[in-house]
Amino acid sequence: DNDDDDDDNDSTEQLPLLLTLPINGRITTLTSIKFKHSKKDCLFFTTERGDYALISYDETLARMNMTGTAGTKANAASANPRSSAFIGEHYPVKTHASGAFTSYSTSVMAGGRQAECGPLMAVDPLQRCVALHVYDGYVTVIPINKDYDINTNVTKGLTTGPFKDAYHARIEERTLLSMAFLETSIDYLPQLSLMHQDARGFQHVITHGVDVKAKGMVFLGSIQKEKEPSDSSSKMPAMKMPPKHDRLKISRIDGGSATLIPIPPPPSRNSSKLGGVVILGQRQVTYHSTAEGITRVVPIAPSILLSYCPVMENDGNATPNVLRFLVGDEKGKIHLLTVLRNITPEGNGDGRVTTLHFDTLGSASASSALVYLGRGRVFVGSQFGDSQLVKILETPVPVSGGGNDEKKSALDQNTYLRILEEYTNLGPIVDFDLRPCINSASSDSASRGKVHGEVGELGKARDQHRQSLVVTASGVAKDGTVRLVRNGVGMREHAAVEMTGIKGMWGLRRKFSHDDDAFLVQSFVTETRILGVQNAKDADVDAMEQEGDTDDDSEPEGG
């Protein structure tokens, strides 16, 4: 469903940087949470020190910073000195909740330690809770308050805020490699699927229930006690565990597996209400559903799969019989994982998974995160090199600079990816060196001074005040580069027009009250031209020509 007829717009389609927000700490996990009373998502993230926060973009504060003046803000602040809208006015972000995991239980700090394979995070698809694995032997659960409205003022306390009281639940599995919430019906408790490794090195997948009201975990082999309804019970029916024979469990999966992808249950009414999981391994990709009694395996070339994202168009017209995921490995290759269901175009069939397909699209930077933006556009976030914005093509094109090598396969010589934009990333910097930046003129004068027996003191003094050049060894593996870094002013080109014979040039504002210039006046010998950027996104520049004086000694007046 990609649009290849708009190739002319690929060069102008970019992802501009809109906001940079400083965070006091190193972000370890990041996800989005959406409340039912809001049309926008909130960002939930954790830091390396065990802190968390929930933030959202504030359009009112952003509009105030862009259009408001200093006098207007000062008058508003004096009228309402307790208003919090002016706190951090340079960052239009509202903080809804923040805290630390160590404040919920002293037993964790007494007997627990930081997870070796963590932290891990998963959000329930029905937005009922957030699960995190921060400490070995524990799963931290933060219940979500569905009735919270992010547009109202932030109130203190977890019960009236976006989250309810969090708690640490003890688990038997020690070495967790991945975890994900299964997609279930509202009748069941949140089902948390865990991939763990035992002492002998075998890897298994097991599923536990998360009982938010009881602040605990319902383990796989346990039987949930039925609670008697009380007079003060809520209108919502009590959630329960799925039948014991339907709870997901699989032992001794492919060694080296590190990622779980939840798959929704079949849409058929007669089928199970509990979904399955796709397990990304180093030698095979496995789909398993205990409720359906199905296991599907597709072998792949040996690789370490690092990231994935679902492929869903913005219009929501997804076919129910096909599920697609983009998967990235450590070599920078991007693959397309297709899950086929037994559903006819008329909607008939049991909806069970029948086949898995794993196809390679092409190479990009080694991805730490993938985000599908729609219309075939994919953002490749990389910690090992430059992040990229790529486009998925319907037909393959030859790899640029690859040449025709008979030893290479057809997949190595052709690609379905086109790089639209790259975002510079200097990290990780393995090594660096500081080199002086010497002017060529001073070096020539110094060399001439040595020939005539003189010392180039002037050139040495000038070089001492010059900037030094930093040479960095950046990136990892195939994304490794040597880069030259120097402090200076960066220029970004928004529009370019070839013109000759300009005698003078200055800027004009659209209105006298505006702070920024909107037009560029160019003075020629026989005419005056006024240029203005009409659309900042497309950078369409139109020139409005105005005839001026023909006198060569005088420039035309006006604007």
Image (cartoon, rainbow, N blue to C red):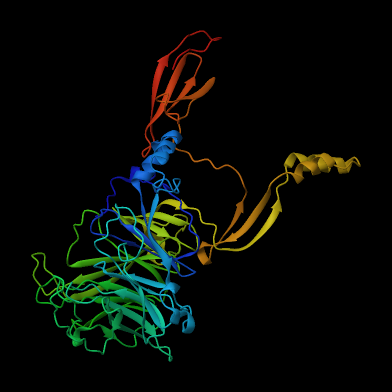
Return the residue found at the far top. 551
Question: Quick check: 125 above or below 400?
Answer: below
- Residue 118 location, quadrant: bottom left
Q: How many marks?
A: 0
Q: Quadrant of the N terminus?
A: bottom left
Viewer-nearest residue: 505 or 191: 191
Viewer-nearest residue: 85 or 136: 85
Residue 501 seen in render: no
Q: What's the residue at 45%, 74% (across, down)? A: 102
Q: Residue 542 location, x and y as percent?
A: 38, 27
Q: Residue 451 location, x and y as percent?
A: 88, 42
Question: Quick check: 5 above or below 332?
Answer: above
Q: Residue 437 location, x and y as percent?
A: 70, 47
- Residue 176 location, quadrant: bottom left
Return the residue found at the far right. 453
Q: Is residue 508 left or right of residue 504?
A: left
Q: What's the residue at 46%, 58% (across, down)? A: 403
Q: Residue 163 location, x and y as percent?
A: 32, 66
Q: What's the residue at 80%, 42% (across, down)? A: 461
Residue 40 seen in render: yes
Q: Quadrant of the C terminus?
A: top left
Viewer-nearest residue: 231 or 182: 231
Q: What's the residue at 44%, 65% (across, down)? A: 332
